[in-house]
Amino acid sequence: MRFLASIAWRNLWRQKRRSLITAGGMAVGMTLCMALIALMDGMFADMFRVMVEQQLGHVQVHNPEYPGKRVMYDTIEDASAVVASLDALDGTVAVAPRAFGAALLGGEAGSTGVQLQGIEPERESALSSLSERLVHGTWLANEPDHGIVLGYRLAEKLHVDVGDSLVAVTQATDGSMGNEIYDVVGLIQTGAAQLDRTGALIHLADLQELLLLGDQVHEITLLGADDSREGIAALATDIQARTPDALVQTWWQTSPPTDQMLSLRDSVSFLVLGAAFLVAAFGVFNTMMMSVLERTRELGVLRAIGLRPGRLIAMVLFESIFLGVIATAMGLVLGGLADAWMVVYGIDLSGYMESGFAYNGVVLEPIFYGHVRPGGILLTVAAVFITSVVAALLPAWRASRLEPVVALRHD
Amino acid sequence: MRTTILMALFTQVAGATEPTALELLTKTDDMMRGQSSSATVVMDVRTNRYERSMSMQMLSSGSERTLIRILSPEREAGTVTLKVDDNIWNYLPKVDRTMKIPNGMMGGRWMGSHFNNSDLVNEQRMSDDYTFTMTGDEGSGWNLSLTPKPDAPVVWGRVELDVGVDQLPTAARYFEEDGTLARTMSWSDVQDIEGRRVPMTMTLVPGDAPEEYTRLTYQELCFDVDIPANTFSLQALRQ
Amino acid sequence: MSIVSVRGLTRDYVQGSIVVRAVRGVDLDIKDGEFTAIIGPSGSGKTTTLNCIGGLDSPTSGTVSVDGTDLGSLSAGALSDLRLARIGFVFQSYNLIPVLTAYENAEFVLRLQGVAAKERRRRVMQTLENVGLKGMEDRRPSELSGGQQQRVAVARAIAGRPALVLADEPTANLDSTTSDSLIALMRDLNDNHGVTFVFSTHDERVIRAAKRVVRMVDGEIESDITK
Ligand SMILES: Nc1ncnc2c1ncn2[C@@H]1O[C@H](COP(=O)(O)OP(=O)(O)O)[C@@H](O)[C@H]1O
Ligand SMILES: [Mg+2]
């Protein structure tokens, strides 16, 4: 076999220009694929960050009754103790308790219904990058001081800005009318439409006071050190062991639609690869067909002196695979450069759309940065190889079926 | 119509002749809305989650204007709800602010009771919006079954009204479009106030939680009082 | 026993609506150690007969047996294996593999046969020396003259130690001096190394060198003379 491969390799260089053009074409296809996949992966990484890490966390803990109905009374009790025990768990990077309450939020110029989110500012900023999403003002103080951070769209709607104050009115757990004044300390722009339009964050202790919740929360969101599925599932199991009565869910259990959307990543990659390599396949097919046809006589000689049809197929496939190897080598260099460029500079579409790219309720920045995964590169390389083999199958098979006499008479 | 808690309760003394269904309905409509009145009311709320009792002063001028000032408990004392036409404002003494209830929040509970904000603003009359059939007689009282007219702006699928021999309503059952019982309102403890017969207690029970209720009990009630017009203004709320 | 036994060999070629009968009922036996020339005018069926003997072409009727095996009963793969093990070919137009050196061309069959590297090297070097190409091992076909290329072809044909070498007009493309020396080489291999040759030719001098001359006319054997 080795010498068949060596003949194939030499055959490849008989038509140097043609082989290089074909390999170059594949390399360009590969470069485009790598760049596109890096771009898609970057977008999906963005989505993962916005949709999973900023909203869902890796694991969520609830009262089993809470999800779906979100009734104020279905709480996790003794929240401080639960949080402390989860803090002590190996593999948790951040533990953030949250409480929620529907409230009427109003200023001088109007009022609107919102979902107040009670958070512990320090813990929340360890978990999500919400605090980095401030477009104006500051993050909530670590001690409760009746500060409130609003989604920037909500602030626009209420005609308030940092420094203004707002009244929140709500029904507390005892049925009484809770009301309090909060000072707007910051505005956030998160990319998540829901948060930007209705997000109103106050200190957890402030919300517990407003709702008379005591030491109860509605949700504990955690981030693990390991963001792989296996890592997150293992973390969820550990958490469940510590909170036997609670509902512990991984992010994909909490939000199957998010899961479905993020799993589109692979379909999109395959689509990109499929399109690029369909074109490349025609190039390879054409090159190999010509290579076989113009050597008909020579192949006839090989068959005459005793080369089995199967080994002739192998020889032709070797040639095509070598073409793929050359293409891969060139493609990895070009694609690597393209990837590096995508990672460092990204693609800036802000000239075309100033407010970003909305997809399924998530607003992404108009500058897309690439995210390079070994899996994405591996996929591309695999596609090159599969293409070189598959596209050469027909030429190879045809070559093997030639009658030696017919081939020998061929000029 | 939806029930209303604006209870300037009006009843003409029953005539001697056998009443028609329309007459009974009109009486009920009239009883549940006012001309000008002043009242002190205790509201007891019992839910699976909490029990509370509030006392409040209610002033109304016709069915368009109402002002309710909370007297106790401490935490909410001084809170005022002002209703003018379709609008509701709450004055919050703790933060010294007045907030208008936005349209989207009209379905919200009022003061933790089983009444919602839109119950406060509703001025419709059952006799306008429903077609009805009646059974019963002077000896046993009457039962009216009310079905909304095709384009009537009402939320109920059907209403059953019980009227006593004194021609005053004793209970009303409100049903959803799909036939489930949404709420039951009952009236009791009828007293003579300034020559009118008025039920002093009104109880609302939600259909999905029969053990819960909101009960309004009149402690004092005067009709045709002189209320200065500027009482029903935003400026007057803080006082 | 004969290495090759041909019985009633007939080969028809269909060209559109015309059927050309290239070979008609040929019977022929080739024994070990023969040095046989098939001669006859152009179009008399020499090439067709050789191709059928070598299993490159298949008879319309009749049988060809090599070592007692009927070629018609073999699959394409088995036929390849039989050619590889038992038959060497020399073609009129050399037909070397252009990307391989003289050495590699001669070595090719040994590689396919799976001969060990050391033995391979010894045999290829020996064979190239026998055909007079010592020192030209690393040349590609394009760097060799026609006569030298045909010597490489002969080396390739005999390196695998076949029972039989079939050569179709091996000297047709060579000048007379070169063809003399090639035929001398073949004869030498036959005399001193026991290689059996069957070749077709027009060339009078080549015919003279043959030990047996089979003359074909119009697809039939006209005469078969062993000197
Ligand atoms: N593939 C073919 N198709 C049609 N006719 C052929 C084919 N091969 C050979 N022939 C015909 O068969 C006859 C014998 O040819 P061939 O065996 O090549 O003769 P020779 O080698 O003696 O010149 C010739 O008439 C030739 O034209
Ligand atoms: Mg010929």
Image (tube, coloured by chain):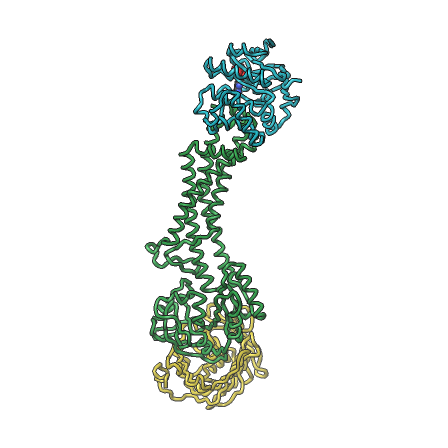
Height in image: B238 above or below C150? below
Can the viewer see residue A169 in this picture?
Answer: yes
**Image quarter hosting the C terminus of chain B:** bottom left
Which is more toward the observer, C216 or C195? C195
Which is more toward the observer, A21 or B215? A21
- Left or right, C140 with reference to B232: right
Rendering coords of residue A306 (x, y %)? 57, 27
Rendering coords of residue A41 (x, y %)? 44, 53
Height in image: A11 above or below A325? above
- Residue found at the very far left of the displayed protein: A351
Chain painted cyan: C
Color of chain A here? green
Color of chain B here? yellow
Which is more toward the observer, B217 or C102? C102
Quadrant of res C7: top right
Quadrant of res B99: bottom left
